[in-house]
Amino acid sequence: MTKSADKVLAQTARSRGTREVAEPPASAADRNGQSSAQPWLHLPGREVQAFGTVRDFPIALPAETRLYSCEQLNQILADSQILYSLYKKHHWLVRGVTFYQLHLLLDKHAGEQLALIDAVAERVQTLGGVAVGDPRHVADLTRIPRSPDGAEEIPAMLSRLLEAHESILVQAHRAAAQIADRGDDGTADLLVSDVIRTGELQAWFLAEHLVDTPLVYTGTTAPSAR
Ligand SMILES: [Fe+2]
């Protein structure tokens, strides 16, 4: 660590109200086996693996296969992060007589999407790739259309979620088949068993809310009109 970095560490500790400023860590060369309790703060970052590359992992899959899987997974990961955000947005913004039911349902689906996002991201890492994580990077990659910043009517909210699901499902079906052909069984299984099955089930629950069905009478006329 340079002398100016030592100075920054000491100044930071002072500016945060530390009564006694801990000794900043000496550089590795100067340390002579001594350790320090002071964390190294404000460390300069540098990219050690570029997005869109894979490391050499010994998991019996060629680099080209793992690279292809990571590309497909990152597209699904970006779109799923947008779907998760739309679920949370609509969980907050729903209104009307079905508020409570939809408020809970949309939050449940959001939680399930969050679990999927984690599984897909960790699959990318398992394959030696780099998972898309920064929301601004997600916004660059996603194919899900942006929603208006304000509130929409409930049917439009549900329809928007359904369309996002279908977009992800189309991508997941295509990717699962091609990835299975390339021999990446683990990724194909994740796509079929988790991404596709969860997406289909959630789409069913949403679609049933878009059926225009009477709540308390049958036929085309209300009882009072008979
Ligand atoms: Fe909530």
Image (tube, rainbow, N blue to C red):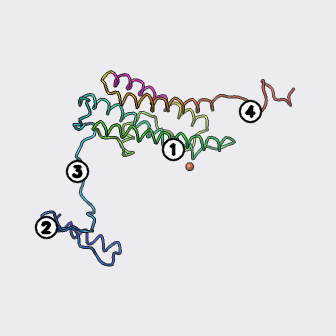
Q: Please tell me whether mark 4 sits on a helix, a strand or a loop.
A: loop
Q: Please tell me whether mark 1 sits on a helix, a strand or a loop.
A: loop
| Residue 169 falls within the magenta-colored stretch | yes
Quickly name the residue at label 4: 215
Residue type highlighted by circle 2:
Asn
x%, y% of residue 87?
A: 52, 41
x%, y% of residue 216?
A: 77, 32
Residue type highlighted by circle 4:
Leu
Q: Earlier in the sequence, mark 2 or mark 4?
A: 2
Q: Quadrant of residue 11?
A: bottom left
Q: Residues within 10 Å of mark 3 (few under 14, many from 20)?
A: few
Question: Marks 3 and 2: in contact by CB < 8 Å?
Answer: no
Quickly name the residue at label 1: 149
Quickly name the residue at label 3: 46
Which residue lies at the image location 34% right of the left edge and 25% below the top edge? 179
| Residue 86 falls within the magenta-colored stretch | no
Q: Residues within 10 Å of mark 1 (few under 14, many from 20)?
A: few
Report the span colored magenta: 165-180
x%, y% of residue 62?
A: 24, 29
Quickly name the residue at label 2: 32
